[in-house]
Image: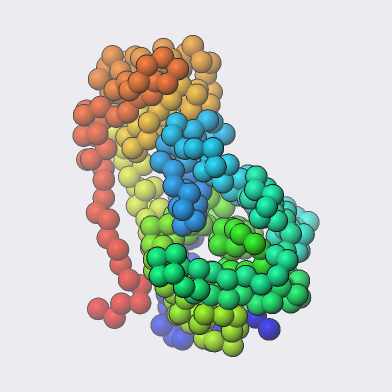
Amino acid sequence: MLFSTPNLTVEERAVVTRVEELRRNLGRNTTQAKRWTGLLRRTAFARAIRGSNTIEGYNVTVDDALAAAEGEEPLEADADTWAAITGYRNAMTYILQLASDPEFSYHADLIKSLHFMMIGHVLSKNPGRWRPGAIFVHNDELGETVYEGPDGDVVPRLVAELVDQLNAEDKNAPAVVRAGMAHLNLVMIHPFSDGNGRMARALQTLVLAREGILEPPFCSIEEYLGRNTQAYYDVLAEVGGGRWQPGLDARPWLRFVLTAHYRQARTLLMRVREMEALWNLLEVEIKRKALPERTLVALSDAADGYSVRNATYRTAADVSEVVAGRDLKLLADKDLLVPVGEKRGRSYVASKQLKSLAKRVRQPRAVEDPFSTK
C-alpha cells in the first residue's frame, strides 16, 4: 500500500489548471528559436542542481553550480561537496536523455542506477542498492528521530508497486499531481541508506519531463524547494506522521507541491521576460561599442550575477581559449566587465554600467499564493 492521491477539490483543480496554463505558456516561450533560450536553459539546470543539494547541506555558489552544469571545475567547492554536486548533475543529465526516449519505462533498476550516479562516490552508503535494514531520519537540532521508514524487507515490494503505478500512467490525474505523489511515496519509502530526498526530487522531475510540455530543466521545482527547505521539511513531517503510515492524508503535501509549481513557473516566466528585455538592451550596447555579437553570452551571464570565466565563456560562445581571453579583456576595456583575480584564476563580473542595464529590466518578485481567497 502506498500513499493515495486525494480526490481533488474544486479549488485544487482550479490551481492545477492555472499551473498547466503557466507551463504551456513557458513551453511556448522556451521553445522559440532565440539565442538566449539556451542560456536560460543552462541556468535553470544549474539552479535545480544547486537547490536540491542545498537541502542536503551541500552548499555551492551560483558560479560553481553553473560550472557543474557546464562540466567545468569549481571555484570554491571542496572535494566532498563537488562530488555530491557532480553526481547529482550526472543523474539529472541522464534524466534529460530519458525524457524523450520512445522505449522508456519505469523500473526498479532505473531508480537504483540514478541513485548510484548520485552517491557512487561514497560506497559506505550503499549506492545503487536498497538499504539493508531499518532507517531513521534524525533532526540534529532537536536531537530526536522525526521519521522511521518501513522495514527494509518490504522496500522491494513497495518500490515495485510505485513503479507499476508510474507505468500505468493514470490519465485521470494531472501530471503535476502524479509527479508529486511519486516524490512523496519514494521519500516516505526511504529505500536507500542515503540520498532519498535527492532521488525523490529527481523522480518528480523525470515524471514531468516525460510529459513533454516543458524541457526537463524547466520542469523542476528543486530551486523552489532549496529556497523553502523548512516548509518542505514541515509538510513532509506533517504528512508522514513520524513513521511509515500510507493511510494518512496526502492533501497538505499535494497543495504544497501545486503551490511550488505555480510559483516556480511564474518565476521562470518572469526570467524569460527579463532575459528578452536584457538581450535587446545588450544588442544595442554592443553595436554602439562595436563589440563582437558573440560577447552577448558573457554579458548576459554577468548581468545575471554570474562570474564569467574563460572556460565557461569559450564553451558557451564556441570560441578558442585565445579568442575568449581577448573578448573578455575587450569587454573589461569597454567598462562592461570587471576582472577579478589573476592569471588562471581570473574571472569577470558585471561592471556598474552592466548592472545598471540589468536593473532596468528587473521585474517585481511577487510571491502569490495560488490558494489565496483574497
Q: Nearer the viewer, residue 210 or 237?
A: 237
Is residue 141 visible in the rendered structure shown here? yes
Q: Which quadrant does the N terminus fall into? A: bottom right
Q: Quadrant of residue 109?
A: bottom right
Q: Determine whether 213 is above or below 2 in the image.
A: above
Task: Count every numbered label the image shows and give the total.
Answer: 0
Question: What colouring method underlies this structural image?
Answer: rainbow
Q: Quadrant of residue 245?
A: bottom right
Residue 27 image position (x, y, % from top left):
50, 54
Residue 127 image position (x, y, % from top left):
69, 54
Q: Is residue 351 left or right of residue 267?
A: left
Residue 114 image position (x, y, % from top left):
68, 54
Tell me the residue at 40%/65% (across/down): 141
Q: Nearer the viewer, residue 199 or 322?
A: 199
Tell me the residue at 54%/86% (across/down): 248
Tell me the residue at 70%/60% (across/down): 111
Is residue 208 visible in the rendered structure shown here? no
Residue 117 image position (x, y, % from top left):
67, 48
Q: Determine whether 191 is above or below 270 in the image.
A: below
Q: Nearer the viewer, residue 122 or 83?
A: 122
Q: Which quadrant does the C terminus fall into? A: bottom left
Q: Is residue 278 left or right of residue 114?
A: left
Tell me the residue at 43%/25% (across/down): 309
